[in-house]
Image (cartoon, rainbow, N blue to C red):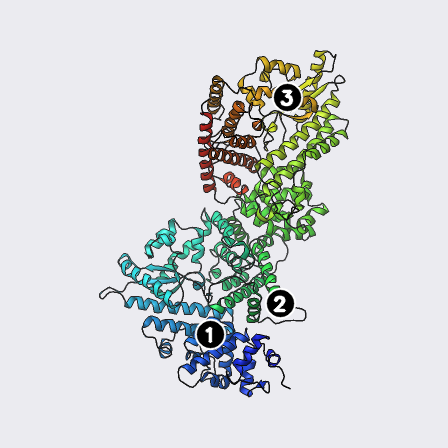
């Protein structure tokens, strides 16, 4: 009985099932003649050795198919196939050719199309492997191809050299660094050959120009991969060379595109908008005046490649002083921040975790950190001026700028990731940096990288485990690489291999944005000095925290705030443990402390509130009823009204911490607190999703504070039994649009008990209101909640408290149109709910007049609006960027909406609301406002409200003016999720102009 063919061949790694049958056919008598189908064994000893070689290929089936195709191609030429005999006679050739055929379908296809070219992989007569250093062998290429002409021959020579490099790489003949150097050398040789072709094609009589081709990027760093653009810069010696040099450069780019890969000259001054070739003098002028930090960073890898090599060296030497002082330029800090932010830009989210180049823990993380450290420290240490990532990293370790263990971990990660990149690109000779998801492709990749199955784990699982290990380590070290040596330099404890001098530490802090590096070093020393457990934990935490501080407009303030919090809590057992062990708490704290003086001041007074940062649910606004109950219960526990109010203010302070932290973090990416998943699996949203939610949450806190303070005031000033008293919210409190700097605008209303003396009841009500204001205005470290009753009838000249009947009499006889406008936001806040409802019913006919407004009243509102603009805007204020009274800001939109309410809410109940955006939407739905105008006003109001809140959070003090430059503008932009302050300011001005124009159309509409 014949044993099954498939099972025997599977031992050699060939696929089972239909694939096994295919392998048997290709190997059998009608194929390569390497397998005896009857005996189920290799045809002879040489066949057995070849089968063993195929079994070691990354993909044995691919190697077999390609080998069969190669033999068939030889047969079609009419010659006796020689490859099988050569494979039997030359073990080195067998190892190299099979490795290539199993790892690269593209190179296999090339060999099939050119069936004699496998001979370049044969062992040399002296027994050595063929040379694989990237040199071109144009003579061999001309001999092994029927093509003629310099460009086709160059293309074949390039492929032959690439074939030799790949074979040496796949069989262990060359390590990663040798392979990258060989690929870079091949690029140099190809550029030089293309240069010669281009020069030879110049019109007769054209003088040969002095033109240098400078390698940049990976090629310049001698770390090119298999498939990549080759970055270059073209330099001409003088103006008279420019015309011919541009012809040569243009032709060189074209030739290289036909032969090997695209040549990319976009790193030149002005990028693709600038001239392709510049003179040496023109380059120097540009870099001295216009170049950005990233352009100097790119010059770290500049290297002569082709053309006039002496001119290239002269160009590099002339620019070197500028490169090594780039970190001192004023714009360097912001440029570095921008480069760090853009590290993972433009990667589709579904590919981010599979990206080995730009994804988290990828090659870009390593390259960026190394180049930044070179820029900072290379100005004083010439040993760091190496163009390649690996030599530069080794130099940083040797110089004490990076710890030995960290450096070795990054080297291992870099080698692994570059190895993965090489195998991915070699397979199809396509530019890719994305690990595949298909099972077969993953199995091939794992085998190509040398991974084998272990007990309980497949080769793919082994590969994934190693990948995750390296990516995690690189991600962890990315920040640590920049910041840990700073800590070691001040910690006064032994540090393995680290010798960062105070001067070097100062330079590093300067480039990371610290304005006072000496002060920052003192803070670090105070936090990490000594051998205590606390200092050790701080040394672990601070690299991540410093990374967050460095991203902020004022890193010094973030570090100072952190030291102050640590000084207050450092001895408590839970503090550092919480930061170290509780997920995002440390980074959230760093973000908050470096972004918001308001929140940092609150935390300085209430440091234990930072526990809120541990859970998303703790950064969710509390419902109004829960707040009111908690605040009132806290007040009830104290008989002394001052102590009761102190307890209420402490709760208010904690709620403000909760809201401010949630607001600051809401646009902080992965740090943002999110709502729980809904039952239907819907997406999670930030716990404070927009400025309207912030306004509601702050108003709820103010309501609860007033309710508890009113209870305390009534206990201290009881008044006659049955006296009803209520607080009515006005302004932003009434509209539930409070911000961080809002006072509580209120009206006080009372109703005397039946039969009571009116004067005595009024005096008692006045005493209650005065006590409430006194308790909440008492000096305290908390943000004040001013109680402002100036919107009452007759303003400050009128009584502080009126009875319901007195309000009715006043509004019936004396009310002005501006008072009706103010009442549009009147809302019951606390006290006697029935009295509050009666007051709202009383004022409804005033604020929602049944017949709308007369022409005279509309004119009066327009007159008051114009007067407010001219008289209330602060002297020197910029009306274009004043969030409250500026063009298209809060007041503009609110006046337009309130005019619509006064004119139409009497007949349209949908307009009867206290919130601006709700009333605007109702007016739009009722056809009172053009939808585009409504959208422009809503956008203008929302952006102004966001900026006003952000200004308070950033500055820690009240202010309505958005600055046009400086750290406060940068802080506002960062807080609102932007990157570019200039772009943000342009957007604000644009939104204001559109909102203003829409407001004017509403205000000027016919009465």
Which quadrant, please, contains the N terminus? bottom right
x, y (%) of residue 831? 70, 24
Label 2: which residue? 462
CA gap between label 1 and label 3 equals 87 Å
Residue 63 point in image, percent of width and height: 51, 76
* Left or right, 645 with reference to 136: right
Disc 3, SS: helix
Residue 610 at least partly seen = no
User: Mark 1, residues whose alpha carbon is within 10 Å: few (<14), some, or many (≥20)?
Assistant: many
Q: Local crowd at mark 3 within 10 Å, few (<14), some, or many (≥20)? A: few
Of mark 2 and mark 3, the one earlier in the sequence is 2
First in sequence: mark 1 vs mark 2: 1
Q: Which residue is mark 1?
A: 108
For residue 467, which quarter of the picture?
bottom right
The residue indicated by pointer 3 is: 841
The CA span between labels 1 and 2 is 28 Å
């Amino acid at each position: 009985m014949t044993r099954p063919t498939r099972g025997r061949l599977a031992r050699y790694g060939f696929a089972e099932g239909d694939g096994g049958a295919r392998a048997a056919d290709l190997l059998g008598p009608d194929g390569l003649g390497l397998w005896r189908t009857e005996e189920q064994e290799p045809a002879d000893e040489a066949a057995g050795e070849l089968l063993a070689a195929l079994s070691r290929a990354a993909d044995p089936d691919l190697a077999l198919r390609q080998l069969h195709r190669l033999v068939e191609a030889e047969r079609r030429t009419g010659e006796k196939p020689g490859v099988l005999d050569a494979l039997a006679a030359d073990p080195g050739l067998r190892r190299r050719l099979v490795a290539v055929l199993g790892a690269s379908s593209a190179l296999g296809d090339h060999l099939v199309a050119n069936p004699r070219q496998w001979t370049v992989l044969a062992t040399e007569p002296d027994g050595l492997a063929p040379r694989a250093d990237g040199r071109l062998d144009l003579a061999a290429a001309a001999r092994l191809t029927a093509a003629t002409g310099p460009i086709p021959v160059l293309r074949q020579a390039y492929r032959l050299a690439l074939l030799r490099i790949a074979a040496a790489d796949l069989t262990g003949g060359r390590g990663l660094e040798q392979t990258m150097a060989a690929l870079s050398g091949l690029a140099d040789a190809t550029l030089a050959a293309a240069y010669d072709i281009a020069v030879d094609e110049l019109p007769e009589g054209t003088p040969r120009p002095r033109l240098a081709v400078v390698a940049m990027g990976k090629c310049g760093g001698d770390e090119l991969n298999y498939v990549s653009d080759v970055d270059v810069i073209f330099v001409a010696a003088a103006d008279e060379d420019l015309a011919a040099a541009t012809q040569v450069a243009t032709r060189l780019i074209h030739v290289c595109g036909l032969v090997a890969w695209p040549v990319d000259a976009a790193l030149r001054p002005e990028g693709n908008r600038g001239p392709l070739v510049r003179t040496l003098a023109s380059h120097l002028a540009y870099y001295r005046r216009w170049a950005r930090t990233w352009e100097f960073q790119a010059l770290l890898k500049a290297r002569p490649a082709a053309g006039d090599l002496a001119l290239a060296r002269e160009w590099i030497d002339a620019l070197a002083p500028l490169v090594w002082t780039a970190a001192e330029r004023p714009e360097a800090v912001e440029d570095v921040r921008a480069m760090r932010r853009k590290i993972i830009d433009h990667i589709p989210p579904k590919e981010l975790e599979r990206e080995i180049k730009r994804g988290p823990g990828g090659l870009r993380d390593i390259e960026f950190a190394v180049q930044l450290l070179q820029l900072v420290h290379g100005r004083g240490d010439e040993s760091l001026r190496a163009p390649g990532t690996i030599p530069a990293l080794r130099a940083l370790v040797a110089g004490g700028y990076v710890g030995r263990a960290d450096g070795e971990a990054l080297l291992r990660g870099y080698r692994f990731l570059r190895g993965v990149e090489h195998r991915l690109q070699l397979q199809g000779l396509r530019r890719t940096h994305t690990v595949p998801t298909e099972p077969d492709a993953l199995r091939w990749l794992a085998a190509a990288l040398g991974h084998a199955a272990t007990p309980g784990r497949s080769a793919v699982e082994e590969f994934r485990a190693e990948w995750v290990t390296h990516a995690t380590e690189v991600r962890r070290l990315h920040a640590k690489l920049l910041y840990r040596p700073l800590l070691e330099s001040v910690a006064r404890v032994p540090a393995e291999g680290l010798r960062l001098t105070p001067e070097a530490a100062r330079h590093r802090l300067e480039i990371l944005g610290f304005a006072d590096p000496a002060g920052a070093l003192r803070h670090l020393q105070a936090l990490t000095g000594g051998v205590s457990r606390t200092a050790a934990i701080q040394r672990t935490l601070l690299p991540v925290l410093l990374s967050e501080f460095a991203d902020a407009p004022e890193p010094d303030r973030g570090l100072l705030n952190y030291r102050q919090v640590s000084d207050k809590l450092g001895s408590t057992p839970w503090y550092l443990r919480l930061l170290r062990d509780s997920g995002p708490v440390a980074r959230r704290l760093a973000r908050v402390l470096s972004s918001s003086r308001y929140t940092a001041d609150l935390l300085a007074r209430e440091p234990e509130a930072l526990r809120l940062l541990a859970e998303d649910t703790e950064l969710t606004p509390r419902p109004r009823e829960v707040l009111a109950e908690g605040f009132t219960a806290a007040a009830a526990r104290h008989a002394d009204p001052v102590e009761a109010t102190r307890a209420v203010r402490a709760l208010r302070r904690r709620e403000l911490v909760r809201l401010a932290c949630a607001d600051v973090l809401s646009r902080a990416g992965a740090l943002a607190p999110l709502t729980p998943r809904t039952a239907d699996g819907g997406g999670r949203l930030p716990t404070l999703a927009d400025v309207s939610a912030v306004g509601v949450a702050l108003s709820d806190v103010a309501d609860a504070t007033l309710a508890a303070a009113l209870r305390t005031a009534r206990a201290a000033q009881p008044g006659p039994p049955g006296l009803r008293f209520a607080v009515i919210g006005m302004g932003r409190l009434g509209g539930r649009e409070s911000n961080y700097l809002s006072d509580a605008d209120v009206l006080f209303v009372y109703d005397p008990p039946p039969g009571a003396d009116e004067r005595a009841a009024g005096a008692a009500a006045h005493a209650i209101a005065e006590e409430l204001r006194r308790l909440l205005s008492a000096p305290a470290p908390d943000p004040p909640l001013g109680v402002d009753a100036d919107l009452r009838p007759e303003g400050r000249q009128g009584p502080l408290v009126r009875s319901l009947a007195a309000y009715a009499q006043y509004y019936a006889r004396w009310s002005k149109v501006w008072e009706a406008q103010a009442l549009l936001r009147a809302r019951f806040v606390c006290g006697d709910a029935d009295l509050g409802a009666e007051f709202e019913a009383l004022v409804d006919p005033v604020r929602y007049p049944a017949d709308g407004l007369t022409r005279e009243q509309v004119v009066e509102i327009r007159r008051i609006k114009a007067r407010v603009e001219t008289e209330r805007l602060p002297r020197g204020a910029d009306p274009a960027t004043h969030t409250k009274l500026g063009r298209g800001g809060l007041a503009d939109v609110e006046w337009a909406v309130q005019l619509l309410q006064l004119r139409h809410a009497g007949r349209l109940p949908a307009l009867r609301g206290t919130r601006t955006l709700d009333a605007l939407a109702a007016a739009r739905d009722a056809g009172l406002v053009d939808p585009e105008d409504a959208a422009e006003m809503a956008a203008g109001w929302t952006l102004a409200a966001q900026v006003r809140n952000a200004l308070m959070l950033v500055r820690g003090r009240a202010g309505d003016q958005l600055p046009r430059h400086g750290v406060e503008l940068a802080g506002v932009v960062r807080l609102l999720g932007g990157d570019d302050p200039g772009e943000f300011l342009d957007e604000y001005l644009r939104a204001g102009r559109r909102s203003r124009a829409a407001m004017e159309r509403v205000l000027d509409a016919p009465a």
